[in-house]
Image: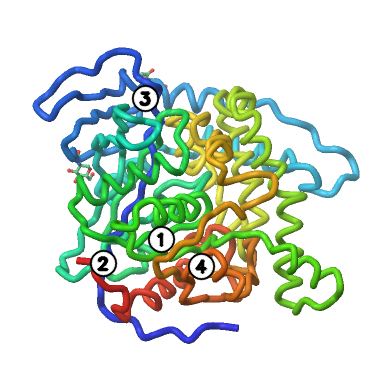
């Protein structure tokens, strides 16, 4: 079933991408500057040039040359695992040819400098520092790296885009390219130990205190969508509405009983089975592992760029619509790996650990999210784990006003169905029904 879309208006959006800047906890007092203390790359142990103060400072990515040389050297020294004779490819991980292909592309063709230049020319990036006094972080300054594109229109809707893992602000690039007029912002990863509540408080402080938006809409999938739900509940004054393409939740006991007795509809059966496949096959191989032993995983993945790229590729390939190798070209695989590799992998691998500590994730799944009262639109894509979630079930967890069900697209639909993501956003917000956004 495809939704009927409201014709697009010419309204423009501010799009905000946020990532945390990977940062070691500070061991010494930062230097003081005219805008208060300044945190530098040295203070934070970063492999790129950056300075963070309470001012909003324009920023471009410029990764240290020695770090890039070390990365390519490591890629060139990759040790490969032989295939098992007679075993079909991808049975228990990617085959040797795939790993070799990534390693050889990385060593002989890939140019981070080209990617970096392109990124800097397209995304207007900034750094700043926020504080979130009413959270577990108290007075710890939180450095943020973000992309901010301001619409020329006075009536534009401020939009905070939250990416997922192992994504980055690059996730939003395809739909952004499709919008007539660019508008955005970008990323930063936070000190180790930060869960959704602290991130949410930091992003709300950025939107309202730093950028001066009164109220805003959040869009996101994957971990970004989980953070968005936490933000909507914790910051009702700031968050006006939510467009989620990951409105994940578990079926209720009564739903499972109807399933077992054969009373469930075809759609409900499809949803319950996808949910069970996720709980039994997909989540344990990365979620449980990341939640329980992220440091163990990081010891290997922080040392092998190709190992990290393969880890990411193997997660994304099965949830990509169409020909996954057209979406996951060696160039994109390596760039996505670089976006994790450059800041370091531990803090983001440990996301599942921090979320679990906050009670947001557990082996029982995703049922711990409280009810979101703000207007919500959900977009369902066939290769996602919660595809087919019926509207009345979705409404148990929030004020879901619009359900947009698609016949193509995967878990990162901004990559394989960017036109649909954009159209859904227009369908939800284009009519101007969300009030009080100025
Ligand atoms: C990085 O490698 C290039 C090419 O081999 C070399 O010219 C350059 O001096 C190296 N830079 C650093 C900082 O090691
Ligand atoms: C970043 O790079 C872009 C394009 O390469 C340039 O226009 C801009 O001035 C640079 N910004 C900073 C803060 O260096």
Counting from the top left corner in percent of width and height, residue 317 is at: 64, 53
Nearer-N-terminus badge (1/4): 1
Name the residue at the top extreme. Answer: 28
Which residue sits at x=86%, y=73%? Answer: 261
Give the residue number, with chain letter if any, for mark 3.
Answer: 46
Name the residue at the right extreme. Answer: 86
- Dot 3: few (<14), some (14–19), or many (≥20) neighbours within 10 Å? some
- Residue 163 shows in the view: no
Nearer-N-terminus badge (2/4): 2
Disc on res. 417:
4
Which residue sits at x=37%, y=25%? Answer: 47
| Secondary structure of the residue carrying numbered label 1 | strand
**25 with respect to 74 (left or right):** left
Q: Nearer the viewer, residue 186 or 85?
A: 186
Give the residue number, with chain letter if any, for mark 2.
Answer: 157
C-alpha gap between disc 2 and disc 3: 34 Å
Mark 4 CB lies closer than 8 A to ligand 2? no
Q: Nearer the viewer, residue 253 or 354?
A: 253
Nearer-N-terminus badge (2/1): 2
Q: Quadrant of the C terminus?
A: bottom left
Badge nearest the viewer, 2 or 3: 2
Name the residue at the left extreme. Answer: 34
- Dot 1: few (<14), some (14–19), or many (≥20) neighbours within 10 Å? many
Q: Quadrant of the N terminus?
A: bottom right
Give the residue number, with chain letter if any, for mark 1.
Answer: 219
| Secondary structure of the residue carrying numbered label 2 | strand
**65 with respect to 245 (left or right):** left
């Amino acid at each position: 079933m495809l939704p009927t879309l409201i014709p697009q208006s010419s309204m423009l959006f501010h799009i905000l991408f946020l990532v945390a800047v990977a940062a070691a906890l500070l061991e010494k007092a930062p230097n003081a500057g005219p805008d208060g203390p300044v945190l530098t790359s040295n203070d934070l142990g970063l492999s790129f040039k950056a300075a963070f103060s309470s001012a909003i400072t324009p920023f471009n990515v410029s990764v240290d040359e020695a770090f890039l040389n070390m990365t390519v050297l490591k890629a060139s020294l990759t040790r490969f695992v032989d295939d098992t004779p007679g075993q079909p490819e991808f049975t228990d991980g990617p085959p040797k040819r795939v790993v070799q292909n990534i390693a050889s592309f990385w060593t002989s063709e890939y140019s981070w400098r080209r990617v970096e230049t392109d990124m800097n020319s397209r995304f207007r990036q900034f750094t700043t520092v926020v504080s979130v006094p009413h959270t577990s972080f108290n007075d710890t300054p939180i450095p943020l790296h973000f992309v901010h594109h301001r619409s020329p229109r006075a009536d534009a809707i401020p939009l905070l885009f939250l990416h997922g893992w192992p994504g980055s602000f690059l996730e939003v690039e395809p739909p952004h390219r499709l919008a007539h007029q660019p508008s955005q912002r970008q990323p930063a990863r936070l000190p180790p130990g930060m869960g959704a509540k602290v991130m949410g408080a930091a992003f709300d402080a950025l939107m309202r205190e730093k950028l001066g938006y009164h109220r805003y809409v959040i869009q996101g999938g994957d971990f970004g969508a989980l953070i968005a739900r936490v933000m909507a509940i914790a910051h009702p004054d700031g968050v006006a509405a939510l467009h989620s393409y990951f409105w994940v939740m578990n079926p209720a006991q009564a739903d499972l009983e109807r399933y077992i007795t054969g009373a469930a509809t075809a759609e409900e059966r499809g949803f319950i089975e996808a949910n069970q496949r996720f709980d039994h096959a997909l989540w344990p191989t990365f979620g449980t592992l990341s939640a329980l032993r992220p440091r163990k995983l990081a010891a290997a993945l922080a040392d092998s760029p190709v190992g990290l790229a393969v880890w990411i590729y193997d997660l994304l390939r099965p949830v990509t619509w169409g020909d996954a190798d057209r979406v996951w070209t060696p160039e994109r695989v390596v760039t996505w790996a670089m976006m994790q590799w450059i800041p370091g992998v531990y803090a983001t691998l440990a996301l599942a650990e921090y979320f679990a500590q906050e009670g947001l994730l557990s082996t029982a799944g995703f049922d711990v999210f409280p009810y979101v009262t703000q207007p919500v639109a959900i977009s369902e894509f066939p290769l996602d784990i919660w595809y087919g979630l019926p509207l009345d079930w979705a409404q148990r967890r929030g004020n879901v006003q619009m359900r947009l069900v698609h016949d193509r697209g995967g878990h990162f639909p901004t990559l394989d169905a960017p036109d649909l993501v954009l159209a859904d956003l227009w369908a939800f917000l284009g009519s101007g029904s969300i009030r009080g956004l100025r």
